[in-house]
Every structure is written in C-alpha cells, then in structure tokens.
Amino acid sequence: MPRTYNGGIASYAIWLPEFAQFIELYQSGKSIDEIKHLSDKENIFKMSSKSRARRCSRNLSVRINALPKTIIDIFPSLNPTNQKIVSLISMMLTSKILNEFVYDVYRPKVIMRENTLQDYEIESFLNQKRIESPEVAKWSLNTFKRLKGALKTFLRDGGLLENVKSNEDKLLFPLIDSQLIIIMKEEKLDYELAALGEV
C-alpha cells in the first residue's frame, strides 16, 4: 500500500473492460511500455480524448505493476464478479485512501452484515482522515467532494455496492474465489483480504 495519501484518485475509474484488455495484452507478451504506446498512438482503449487515454493507460500500468503476477495469471479464469474484485484490489494497492476506506467502512459492514451505506458514513471517514493526517487536511473542499463520489463509484464498479436511493447504497457481499483467497494469503495481501471481509 502507498505510504502517502493522494486525492487524485478521484480522477480515475475502475475501467474494468480496459483493465481486462490490458491484462490480455500483457499476457500475450506485450510489455507495459508497449501497451502504453499503443494507447497513445492507436487509442486501443477507445477513450474520448488523448488526455483521457493517457490517464487511463498510465493508471492501468501502475495497477498492473502493483498486482502480484500470480493474481494476473489467474485473472482470465475468474468469473466476472471476481474479476471486478481483482480490479478493485489493484486500485486499493495503489491508493492508501481507498484501501483504508474499504477496510474501515466496508469490512465492519461485512462482519455485522449491515447492507446499507449512507453518505454521512463516507463523510465521517473522510473527516476522520482529515483529523488524523496533516496531508489530507490540506486538500480542498472540492477534492473531498469529488473523492466522496469516487469512493462510492469504486465500490459500485468493484461489485461491492449498488445504488438504491439518491443518498443510500446497498452493500453486496460477493463470494471471493477460493483460489484468489489462497493467492492473496501467499502474497501477503492479508490487509486487503481482511478489508474485503475475509479472515
């Protein structure tokens, strides 16, 4: 997990189809630099602008680098639910604020089987981080506003959340593939595994 907080995560997305495509190209023998070049020159991820294509490919490359090779290797064999989870894990491994959000907010809900997430709970988490971290305290109100929405979107796109009302979301507790659990334990991803509700 990164040692510092970065509010810039609000500029990114899970990008699951692009994430899967990146892994497919990577496993076919393309290097990460070659895939970034293809994105820049040929817009292989079909982004709406060159700047967005660059932002997407750079974020995906960092996330692929953060994932253990063993997880990348099993990705194609996982069902869609677990592919979403792996994509979320890759975000967690590159974002301290997201990693701690899943651990501090989602994990207790799994343990207690509370299936709702309300806006004030996200605000409470961010306010606590602002108190704990001088780094986070420097962020603008706009960054906090964007981050609040981004954290919910990451959980939705990662398969952990679905929207039911304007200010309330229903939490989902997907079954994590046993092979993925074993690999995460072997790769010392115990914090991330616990964050997702697994022992």
Image (tube, rainbow, N blue to C red):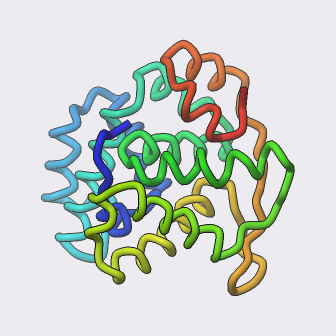
Q: In this view of the protein, which residue sits in the foreground, 51 or 168?
A: 168
- Say whether residue 52 is left or right of residue 82: left
Vertical comparison of 198 with 84: above or below: above
Where, by quadrant of the figure, is residue 82 drawn? top right
Look at the image and tell me in which quarter the C terminus lies.
Answer: top right
Query: What residue is shown at x 60% (from left), y 49% (from top)?
Result: 104
Q: In this view of the protein, which residue sits in the foreground, 72 or 11?
A: 11
Total tally of numbered discs in the picture: 0
- Say whether residue 32 is left or right of residue 171: left
Query: What residue is shown at x 50% (from left), y 18% (from top)?
Result: 188
The residue lying furthest to the top in this view is 186
Look at the image and tell me in which quarter the N terminus lies.
Answer: top left
- Say whether residue 193 is left or right of residue 40: right
Question: Where in the figure is residue 154, as x and y percent of width and height?
Answer: 53, 60
The residue lying furthest to the bottom in this view is 166
- Say whether residue 36 is left or right of residue 181: left
Question: Where in the figure is residue 98, as x and y percent of width and height?
Answer: 47, 53
